[in-house]
Image: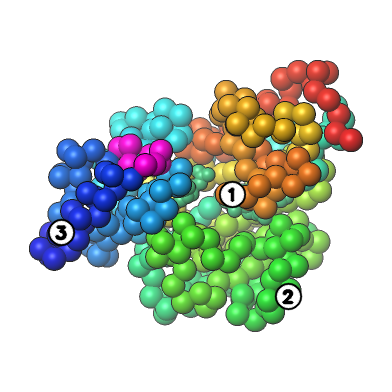
Amino acid sequence: CVDPETLGFIENEYAKLKKTKSRMLMKKYLTKEVFNKTKHRITAGGATLYDVIKSGLANPDSSIGLYAPDAESYTLFHELFDPVIDEYHGGFGPTDYHPGINFGTPEALGDLNEWGNYVVSTRIRCARSLEGYPFNPLLTLEQYAELEQDIENALDTLDDDLAGYYRPLNRISLEEQDELLNQHFLFKHGDRFLEAAGACRFWPDGRGIFLNSDCTLIVWINEEDHMRIISMQKGGNLAEVYDRFVRAVTALGNRLPFSFSQRLGFLNFCPTNLGSAIRASVHVRLPMLGQDRNILEATADQFHLQVRGTSGEHSEAKDFIYDISNRRRLGLTEIEALQEIKSCSEIDNKNVPEAT
Ligand code: ADP
Ligand code: CIR
């Protein structure tokens, strides 16, 4: 049970939240009833309701506004997480179970540019956390170092086209970080949603990036999650990108104990990154549809797709290049998550104006 001082603080923050204008899902589902049920609780690792909602409290423009400081938060604060998860993943009720792992057949996905050169580049990533460790806000400096070492050891075993090397962030100059960011390889620094969630402590220690020799397999360590495993390349060859992704995730999963729950699949820091935790995205130039982002988002929504800008989440589109990806990651298998983006390319290719 939280102490009286913390409880008073949480009640005060909740009163402020009620007066704030925001469409975030955390606010929508943190009703008075849910608040009163959960405000006294604290996980074994020390996470309170305040820790769970503090990113949303600081950023009313959040879309979700909710993070799990540890795996236990998903069950201890289930009255709040369940409806947010249900809405974000497009129908995943409190008694639903994530299906088993099924990577399917990569070759069947083909090339998205079969009908014309619309897709600039293709990227598939998943989030993974390691069992036995909390997520970012509760990690100690020693745990950051342990995680970094264990993951680096596993990365060292990758071979053939997957082989590469790991670079700790604190040994990459700021100029080079900028260059890697502009190439869309490296994560950004100072994300205010993560900062407010308490996820950037000890930065840049414990963080880093692994790149294979042709920069088509990338692994981020301890950014938003313990691991982000990314396969990417120019063009629209979804089959090639996914094949590399599956091989890398499988090889690393054979070496590392990924945090997994029967109900919620792979467990990660943000409730959007559960289940398969896969985001398959294309950078695609949309000079017509992209003129009005609201219309584009409404259109994408019909196909369970999400729109981001050219530099990722919470960014603008440059030269009408948008990042379009599957929105749902939980309640569908890996190959079904890929089908979300694949089937969209098959809708009516003949009527889509070609990029110039
Ligand atoms: P994620 O949560 O998947 O890591 P972000 O929105 O934070 O996504 O984006 C991370 C980086 O990946 C950004 O630099 C973004 O521009 C880049 N990115 C995403 N999709 C693609 C793509 N299809 N091609 C090239 N870069 C991409
Ligand atoms: C937010 O709530 O907007 C941020 N914490 C990020 C949420 C995850 N991203 C997403 O669904 N686009």
User: From mark 2 to mark 3, how far is it between C-alphas?
Assistant: 45 Å
Residue 307 seen from this side: yes
Looking at the image, is mark 3 or mark 1 earlier in the sequence?
3
Q: Residue 21 occupies which quadrant of the picture?
A: top left
Label 3 CB-ligand 2 distance < 8 A: no
The image's colour scheme reads: rainbow
Where does label 1 land, which residue?
Answer: 313
Q: Nearer the viewer, residue 165 or 123?
A: 123
Label 1 CB-ligand 1 distance < 8 A: yes
Q: Residue at x 83, y 25 (%)?
A: 353
Whether residue 125 appears in magenta in the rendering, the answer is no
Residue 62 drawn at (x, y percent):
45, 47
The amino acid beneath tag 3 is Leu
Q: Nearer the viewer, residue 303 or 126?
A: 303
Q: Nearer the viewer, residue 173 or 216?
A: 173
The amino acid beneath tag 1 is Glu
Quarter in which the N terminus is drawn: bottom left
Q: Which range of residues does the magenta coloring cover?
A: 21-29
Looking at the image, is mark 1 or mark 2 earlier in the sequence?
2
Where does label 3 land, which residue?
Answer: 7
- SS for tag 1? loop
Where does label 2 land, which residue?
Answer: 175
- SS for tag 3? helix
